[in-house]
Amino acid sequence: MSALFYLGMALICVIGIAALFSKQLIPKVGKTLVFMDMSRQLSKSKLVEKKVTLSNGIVAWYLERASQGSPDGPTLVILPGSTVYMRLMGVEASALLASMPKRRVIILELPYHGKNAAFDYDFSNPDCSMSGMANYVEEFRKALALEEPFDLMGYSLGGGIATHYVLAHHNRVNKLLLLAPYYYEAATDIYNAIYDQKQWGNLNGWETSEDMAHWFHTWLGLDTKDTFPGLIMSGLAAVRSELYPPEYWSKIYDVFFEAWDESKSFLEDNASSLAELTCSVLVLTAAMDKICDPTKLTRLDGLFNSELCTVKSLNSGHFFASGGQTLSEVAAPDMVEFFSV
């Protein structure tokens, strides 16, 4: 054999080892960078991770920023969207928090999300229905002894849960903000069609960075020119895989599919009760939303008390906006104005 042959074989081996090393290393490096950036932003927002035991023995996790000096308003409770865990919601709320520096803010980890993930696939307790999750919010309120009316904000699924909550406990809520809120009746036709066919892999059931890219671009509104570097995409996917076991979201969405059946006609069934609510309501829709139909959501103006409800459309997708922004960043000025009046 010639020396050139051996040199070539050695080069192939080096390249192979480097490729294998990169496949293992890149997600780890990316995950570390994502985690460090999240931690930095949460620290800057003064959000601290806490937990409390509910009356039924369940441990509820949340982020809290304590009020600073004389609070600039009531406590704000934020409910994240489906698969959005509290730390990510904390990062997304950073612009809002920075504009309300003295207010106490609580971001609740939804059942079966993030720190509440059920690794044994036991999705029976707490109740997965919308009303059951709203009851989880009430049990959390009791555990924290939030006796004064508080402001309530819900993003996506959190918006649907928040609406269920305010109907059941209207005296507890001072103001209600719904950011691209999810209701089956107000979801886009294409989303509902895929949801009804239980194609979770095309919705929230992704596990790989490739599936995640599809989810970000197809459903969340991420423009291709704003795509994150591969290192970050791998890191985000690695963070998710660390939080949840394989097929977690496919399994839990099977449960959600049955548990949420009662909510498929929620807006229609509760039209009279929604009209009787006396709290101010701001609904912020996303004009390019592929999940929550902005046109259908304009119905909320006629369902809530029209004198107390405002519906406004923002130039964004369900999560991402153009120019590297997110829906939360675009919505921050409107949210601040609403909570400050």
Image: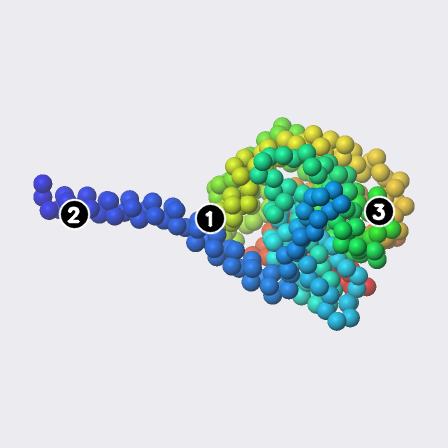
| Residue placed furthest toward the bottom | 69
Residue visible at 68% across and 62% down in the picture: 65
Q: Which of the marked residues, 2 or 1, is nearer the chain's N terminus? A: 2
Residues 62 and 215: in front is: 62
> How many angstroms separate mark 2 from mark 1 (CA)?
33 Å
Q: Residues within 10 Å of mark 3 (few under 14, many from 20)?
A: few
Judged from the image, the secondary structure of the residue bearing numbered disc 3 is: loop
Callout 3 touching callout 2 (CB < 8 Å): no
Dot 2 alpha-carbon crowd within 10 angstroms: few under 14, some 14 to 19, many 20 or more: few
Q: Nearer the viewer, mark 3 or mark 1?
A: 3
Q: Quadrant of residue 269?
A: top right
Which numbered disc flags the more N-terminal residue, 3 or 1? 3
Residue lying furthest top = 197
Q: CA distance from mark 3 to mark 2?
A: 74 Å
On-image quarter of the N terminus = top left
Q: Position of residue 98 (x, y in %)?
A: 67, 66
- In the rendered image, residue 245, in percent from the top left (x then y), is placed at 53, 39
Residue furthest to the left: 1
Residue matched to label 1: 234
- Residue nearer the viewer, 92 or 329: 92
| Residue at 64%, 60% in the rendered image | 48
Instruction: Tell me the residue that label 2 is attached to.
Output: 7
Amino acid, disc 1: Ser
Q: Secondary structure at mark 1?
A: helix
**Label annotation for residue 169:** 3
**Amino acid under label 3?**
His
Q: Residue at x 88, y 42 (%)?
A: 273
